[in-house]
Amino acid sequence: KQEVTQIPAALSVPEGENLVLNCSFTDSAIYNLQWFRQDPGKGLTSLLLIQSSQREQTSGRLNASLDKSSGRSTLYIAASQPGDSATYLCAVISGNTGKLIFGQGTTLQVKP
Amino acid sequence: EAEVAQSPRYKITEKSQAVAFWCDPISGHATLYWYRQILGQGPELLVQFQDESVVDDSQLPKDRFSAERLKGVDSTLKIQPAELGDSAMYLCASSLWTGSSPLHFGNGTRLTVT
């Protein structure tokens, strides 16, 4: 059974700092991995999707990497801003049903 | 940019009452998902549709929950009777196809059962 873990559960950093969020999964047979952002009381916004054949994806100040063999992904946020404060969730699709399995998220606070 | 529409945004109901949520996916998206998210946790899949057919409802509490997508477009999730433990955010998502296509989520329905 696929399990997804995110560490740390919460993170507080000063504005301008570069930071890394971690995601690990137990079954390396995945189709893709997706990172989401969730603001309080809102739905999920897709940030980056990495296909199983890819090693990384970049969007603006965000860079996500994928190492299937070790069951790990990282989300790198450069030059963090207070507007980046949110919960970040990673999720993997494994198997052929497209079922997305989520981690519990990392809640990020960027202090001005 | 096209969005997944959900209604209502908030719902407060008493236990033992019936409640229903509606979702309209992005046009052309064949796959539709209902997720439940308890506060402080990641979302968990309740049911997945491919067009009008159920692909996965293994985590749906079928004694009280039901879901349908009759014409393969919009979908309704119903709870009857509601229990206190059903209080959560109910999220709908859609994707072009099953597998490698990214999921797009709606803003969710926040359910409070009193």
Image: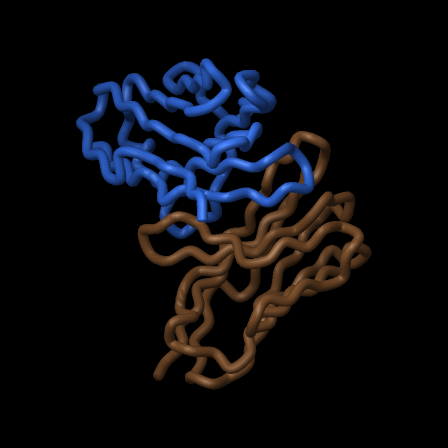
Chain colours: A brown, B blue
Q: Position of residue B68 (x, y in %)?
A: 44, 17
Indicate the quadrant containing the C terminus of chain A: top left, top right, bottom left or bottom right: bottom left
Displayed quadrant of residue A50: bottom right
Q: Is residue A30 above or below residue A49?
A: above
Q: Left or right: where does residue B58 sit relative to residue A43?
A: right
Q: Nearer the viewer, residue B66 or A63?
A: A63
Residue at position x 73%, y 43% in the image: A31
Q: Position of residue B9 (x, y in %)?
A: 26, 39
Q: Position of residue A69 (x, y in %)?
A: 81, 56
Residue at position x 59%, y 40% in the image: A100
Residue at position x 63%, y 54% in the image: A49
Q: Is residue B65 above or below residue A77?
A: above
Q: Nearer the viewer, residue A93 or B82?
A: A93
Residue at position x 64%, y 47% in the image: A92
Q: Nearer the viewer, residue A46 or B37?
A: A46
Q: Is residue A58 above or below residue B9?
A: below
Q: Nearer the viewer, residue B26 or B111?
A: B26
Indicate the quadrant containing the N terminus of chain A: top left, top right, bottom left or bottom right: top right
Q: How many marks?
A: 0
Q: Position of residue B103 (x, y in %)?
A: 55, 43
Displayed quadrant of residue B102: top right
